[in-house]
Amino acid sequence: MKKEEKICEHCQQNFSISEEELILYKKVEIELPTLCFFCRIKLHLSFWMFGKFRKGKSDLSGESLITVLPEKTRYPIFTLTEWHSDKWNALDYGIDYNPDISFLKQLQNLQEKIPHPHQNGSKNTNCDWCDDVWNSKNCYLSRSMEECEDLFYSYRNLWVKNSIDVVICFHSEKCYDCGDCHNSYKLFYSRHSRDCINSYFLYDCRNCQNCFMCWNLRNKSYCIENVQYSREEYDKKIKSFQLGSYNSIQNYKKHFEEIAQKEAVHRQNFNFKNYNSDGDYLFDCKNCHNCNTINESEDSYNCIRGMRHKSDIDANGSWYSELIGNCSGCVNAYALKYSTWSSSRYSEYLDLCLECEYCFGCVGLKKKKFCILNKQYTKEEYESLRDKIIADMRKRKEYGKFLPYSMSTGPFNFSTSFLYFPETKKEDILKLGGYWEDINESHIEGMPTSELPDDIKDITDDIITQALICPETGWRFNIAENELIFYQANNIPLPRYHFDVRTKNQLKYLTVLKSYPYKCFYCEKDIMAYYLPEWNYQKIACEECYKQNIA
Ligand SMILES: [Zn+2]
Ligand SMILES: [Zn+2]
């Protein structure tokens, strides 16, 4: 097989498919992509909501619920429990295949009748104001987490407790405003740090305690700006820093970004313990290429935000899957193609189907076999109708493409895709058949955060009854009681922006999917690294030089 050159149907850019990719496409038995790598991810992640939390009602029982799904949906919403119950049967919605109409149009018509669960997740206690939440307890206004406890306003965390405003963190406790930090305790305003305690503004530090505004440090205590102090001097200085003041924290944040630009040495990537793999944020991977934010995976290509991939290609937001291709949000899947939110086997074009086998173009089915458009067939009927549909789809140039934007879960600007592609324009998404929602909340009343006292020590407890207005979005937010206790105990000023704005600001450093050419700061070798050129990082090091100089 020889490398193929293609033009992306969405962005019209050239892209190529490598020999290795061609081999895997063949093994997974999917059609070659018609979209470039970025447009594939963009489409896939538009099926994964990062919506604004709102109260609503079940379309089945009228029971109240809290969801990130939009107010105006193309489909009914049931509570998660109702959705999993036998109070409804997805086969009741089954339709006959009509060869005169596009199959994907028929699938969309079916999809719009099938209820959608209000929340994603299972086995949680007191996590109503959350989404994409698994085995967690007492979390509030947070998304995408597993085995977390007492988290506020956080995103994509594993095994994190008692923290606020943390994104992509692991095994940490009592942290605030951190991104990509691991095994840390009482770490504040930090990025890319591990095994750190009682520290502030750390950038790529390891095993540090009681440090402030440091970078690339290893095994240190009582350092400020990478200068060693005695314990007494350090304590004295920290006391003088006015950490409870919002204005002084803003100045420290500015300084922190200047340090990232001019002083800190940046790793070429954040890959750990991998074999023959490339991409960024890979952990414990073998033969994985062009992947991002995945762990414990092997022999996969072009996958982001996943875990335990095996021989997968173009599978995003997918966990525990094997031989799947062109899928989004599929967990526990095997030999699944062109599907979303499904844990099924040997099937194609599924949405929200659980534990199904040999199904084609179905929505919301559980434990079914040989179904097409939610109708039950015999094995023989299934096989012949499936083959006919595939032939018809080929004639219409539909077969092998992922579900279109018109079938995505909600407005693009409230999806996970917008976190990775924040520059996307409304008109471009509408042109592709997708959705967009402009929320105007200027009518909402509350206190502008500019009127808040600067220092946390001047905030009175009745602030928890006050609606605050975000200066960027005009959205209302509140300070919860336990949140205020956390800020007071840790001398942290109240936030001024809505929590979704805060999450997005943190994520912009952790969601770069494209690598850019740089020269290693030490050896001047040409390298590719996942830092946006406009961040202006001066010291980016190749893997070898980073190991030698920073370790
Ligand atoms: Zn493209
Ligand atoms: Zn180098």
Image: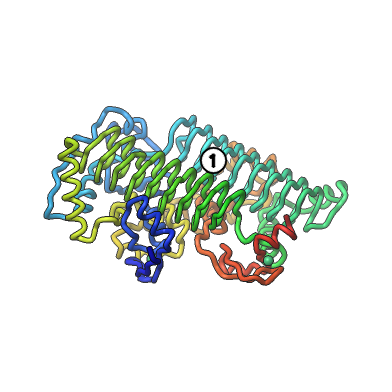
**Could you tell me the amino acid type at mark 1?**
Thr
| Residue 95 appears in the picture as rendered | yes
Residue at disc 1, CB closer than 8 Å to ligand 1: no
Q: How many marks?
A: 1
Q: Nearer the viewer, residue 411 or 9?
A: 9
Q: Is residue 216 left or right of residue 103?
A: right
Task: Give the x, y percent position of residue 282.
Answer: 55, 51
Q: Quadrant of residue 11?
A: bottom left
Task: Give the x, y percent position of residue 445.
Answer: 46, 50
Image quarter for ligand 2 equals bottom right
Q: Is residue 36 left or right of residue 144?
A: left
Task: Give the x, y percent position of residue 439.
Answer: 39, 55
Q: Residue furthest top?
A: 86
Q: Does residue 70 sit above or below 151 in this rendering?
A: below
Please tell me whether mark 1 sits on a helix, a strand or a loop: helix
Identify the residue position indicated by label 1 in the image: 465
Residue displayed at 14% across by 47% down: 97
- Quadrant (top left/top right/bottom left/bottom right) for the N terminus: bottom left
Q: Is residue 183 left or right of residue 382?
A: right
Residue displayed at 80% across by 53% down: 223
Residue displayed at 50% across by 53% down: 288
Q: Residues within 10 Å of mark 1 (few under 14, many from 20)?
A: few
Q: Nearer the viewer, residue 236 or 86?
A: 86
Q: Nearer the viewer, residue 28 or 452?
A: 28
- Quadrant (top left/top right/bottom left/bottom right) for the C terminus: bottom right
